[in-house]
Image (cartoon, rainbow, N blue to C red):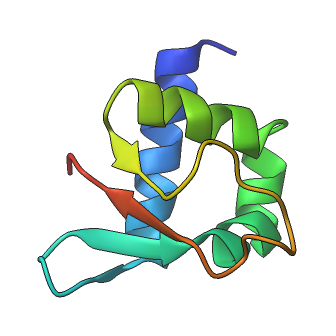
Amino acid sequence: MNVDHEVSLLVKEIQRLGNKNADGKTSVKFGVLFNDDQCANIFEALVGTLRAAKRKKMIDFQGELLLQGVHDNVDVILLKE
């Protein structure tokens, strides 16, 4: 799949699963994204898609890489709606 397409799908999933934070930006916990059945069916490599979206400055999260279990409570913040 094309990276831009995957990033646009990721944005839609963050909007679907997330909530507005104090800054008015949509935010979702990594664990919620990772454990969602619909996301699992869409993304073969969710972590790779998250890194690509971060490089494109579409999202932000703390650290370079998110791992299931260890980073389940890390916020993935949508920078561009």
Q: Tell me: 73 left or right of 18.
A: right
Up/down of 47 relative to 36, above or below: above
Q: In which quadrant will I find the N terminus?
A: top right
State which quadrant residue 35 falls in: bottom right
The structure residue drawn at horizontal position 38% and vertical position 47%, both measured from the top left corner, is 59
In percent of width and height, residue 5 lies at 51, 23
Closer to us: 46 or 23: 23
Q: Tell me: 42 left or right of 80.
A: right
The structure residue drawn at horizontal position 20% and vertical position 51%, both measured from the top left corner, is 81
Residue extending farthest front: 63
In percent of width and height, residue 39 lies at 71, 57
How many numbered marks appear? 0
Up/down of 78 relative to 43, above or below: below
Up/down of 78 relative to 34, above or below: above
State which quadrant residue 66 falls in: bottom right
The structure residue drawn at horizontal position 48% and vertical position 74%, both measured from the top left corner, is 28
Residue extending farthest left: 24
Closer to us: 53 or 11: 53
Up/down of 27 relative to 46, above or below: below
The structure residue drawn at horizontal position 51% and vertical position 41%, both measured from the top left corner, is 9
Closer to us: 3 or 59: 59
Residue extending farthest top: 2
Q: Tell me: 26 left or right of 80.
A: right
